[in-house]
Image (cartoon, grey):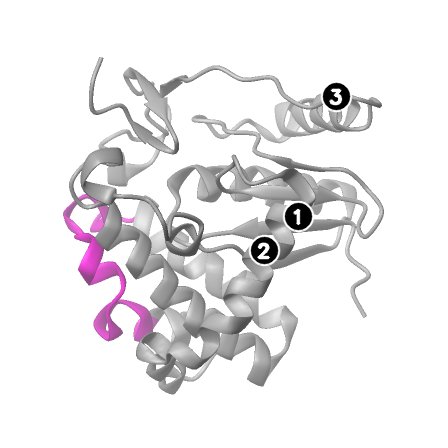
Amino acid sequence: MNNADINFYFDPLCPFAWMTSKWVRKVAAQRDYAVEWRFISLRMLNADVDYDSHFPVGYEAGHTAGLRLLRVAARARAEHGRQAVGPLYEAIGSQAFDSAAAPALGPEERGSREFVEPLLERAGLPAELAGALDDASWDGELRAETDEALALTGKDVGTPIIHFEPPGGTAFFGPVISRLPSDQDAIRLWDHVVGLASFPGFAELKRSLRERPQLRSFGVDPGETGIQEDWHGGSRRLKK
């Protein structure tokens, strides 16, 4: 039974989902919230999209690598329980986005055994779970959970999706943040977001101009401010 205060739907290789997840972890630690880490696949969400015309080079490979890692996470959950997902996601995100090696990691590398096996061990899980990378039998479960997330928000969204006070609470895509707030600001931001989310009839507050996130994978170190770019559909715009 899910007794979570928050359901957090993530694709493990979405940088903005990762940044938002770090903020949610700060809030959960201070408010003693229970978080259920659930799955949404950007590759499945964009299954009918022509990547060559809609995304920059490398996005299809990156989304496919995210799907491969979600298969591993699904197997970890099946064999080791829901509590295994959060530490595994944290290990993957830390290595993919925040480590010294992050800027040099290519999308295919992030979806490889060589990448995920040591991260499984870091999360206290057996490296053999990496065998799920190529196991499409997990895709039905991942597709169902992706559909579950989209049923909460509508289909014109990305990751992350946060479901407040499930099963009956409101769910939204985002918030999309580029900077990790301090502990105090994390709570302030959370209270503002929950206030908006709980207002009857509220649906969207959006801007497409974003700073590159404070992640080493983007060449932006903690404390630095990334350049501002125009994003569309989860990627930097190909055309002005």
Cα gap from disc 1 to disc 3, whole angstroms: 17 Å
Disc 3 packing (10 Å; few <14; some 14–19; many ≥20): few
Cα gap from disc 3 to disc 2, whole angstroms: 22 Å
Q: Nearer the viewer, residue 178 or 141?
A: 141
> In x, y percent, where is residue 96?
31, 52
- Residue at the spot of label 2: 147
Q: Identify the amino acid type marked 2.
A: Asp
Magenta region: 99-118
Q: Earlier in the sequence, mark 3 or mark 2?
A: 2
Cα gap from disc 1 to disc 2, whole angstroms: 6 Å
Mark 1 in CB contact with mark 2 (< 8 angstroms): yes
- Residue at the spot of label 1: 151
Mark 1 in CB contact with mark 3 (< 8 angstroms): no
Q: Is residue 128 above or below residue 11?
A: below
Q: Is residue 82 above or below residue 158?
A: below
> In x, y percent, where is residue 132?
38, 80
Q: Identify the amino acid type marked 1.
A: Ala
Quarter of the image holding residue 179?
top left
Q: In the image, is residue 101 part of the stretch drawn in magenta? A: yes
Disc 2 packing (10 Å; few <14; some 14–19; many ≥20): some
Query: Which circle marks residue 131 in the picture?
Result: none
Horizontally, residue 152 falls left or right of residue 71, namely right
> In x, y percent, where is residue 62?
27, 52
Residue at image position (26%, 40%) is: 217
- Residue at the spot of label 3: 202
